[in-house]
Amino acid sequence: MEIDALWYIELKNGNENGLNRFMKLYLKPLSFFAYNIVQSKELTEELVVDAFLKVWNYQEKFQSDQHAVRFLYQVTKNACLNAVEKNKHVPPFDYELDNLLIYDDTDIQQQIIYDEFLQQVEKELAKLSEQQRNIFRMSCMQGYSTQEICLLLETTPQVVFNAKSKSIKHLRNVLDKPNNWFGVILFSCYLGN
């Protein structure tokens, strides 16, 4: 995981540039993470903004850049779970922010890695044709069968097979670099190939 350490130093010193850099690095992956829980774009935006505000309010308590990132994800996860519970008309669970500062959740770290991997995949998918992108997403990310894709896109199984093969080949070529073992491992686990 590449991290620009300058954001952490600036954030810790109360410089808004640090917060801006931090937001630039984590806004998309955090939004993806939150959306997967709450399934609402508007609510996701609100919860993510609140999470960054909490990071700003607790900036002096962080012991490292990774500590700040874990805190950001944990605060977001808790807010998302509270929002989901609230929509079920159940009183939300009260989380103590000070306890989150020392909480180290491996699930959060795994989610961060997974979100960064998906960002890398999405970046590479943008280089493919629209048809290849759509078929890859439907097949590999959304779990549609070839037959379902054919019905939805009004195409043939051969077109689906070709588009999926080309997109997987492209992703493997990009992710299967000697200096990108991280991408290779995740890509193989992700596709199960």
Image (cartoon, helix red, strand yellow):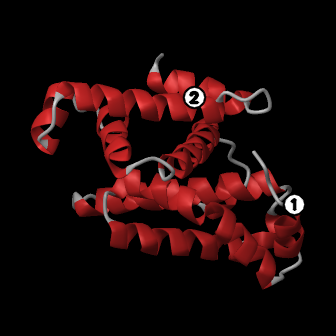
> Vertically, is 139 above or below 15?
above
Mark 2 lies on a secondary structure that is helix
Q: Which residue is mark 1?
A: 5
Dots 1 and 2: beta carbons under 8 Å?
Answer: no
Left or right: residue 5 versus residue 165 is right
The residue located at (22%, 57%) in the rendering is 88
Mark 1 lies on a secondary structure that is helix
Query: Residue 10, how many percent across, how many down?
Result: 87, 74
Query: Residue 23, how many percent across, how many down?
Result: 66, 70
The residue located at (84%, 65%) in the rendering is 8
Quadrant the N terminus occupies: top right
Closer-to-camera residue (162/67): 162
Q: Residue furthest top?
A: 193
The residue located at (15%, 37%) in the rendering is 155
Which amino acid does the dot numbered 2 rest on?
Answer: Arg
> Vertically, is 6 above or below 193?
below
Which mark, by number, is residue 172?
Answer: 2
Dot placed on the residue nearer the N-terminal end, 1 or 2: 1
Using the rendered view, name the quadrant where residue 44 is placed.
Answer: bottom left
| Foreground disc of the pair 1, 2 | 2
Query: Distance from label 1 to label 2 (Cα)?
Result: 30 Å
Mark 2: give few (<14), some (14-19) or many (20+) Cα within 10 Å.
Answer: some
Residue 93 visible? The answer is no
> Vertically, is 97 above or below 133?
below
The residue located at (30%, 25%) in the rendering is 161
Residue 150 visible? The answer is yes
Left or right: residue 190 versus residue 81 is right
Query: Residue 139, how many percent across, how many down?
Result: 31, 33
Query: Residue 74, how many percent across, how many down?
Result: 58, 53
Which amino acid does the dot numbered 1 rest on?
Answer: Ala
Which mark, by number, is residue 76?
Answer: none
Using the rendered view, name the quadrant where residue 175 is placed.
Answer: top right
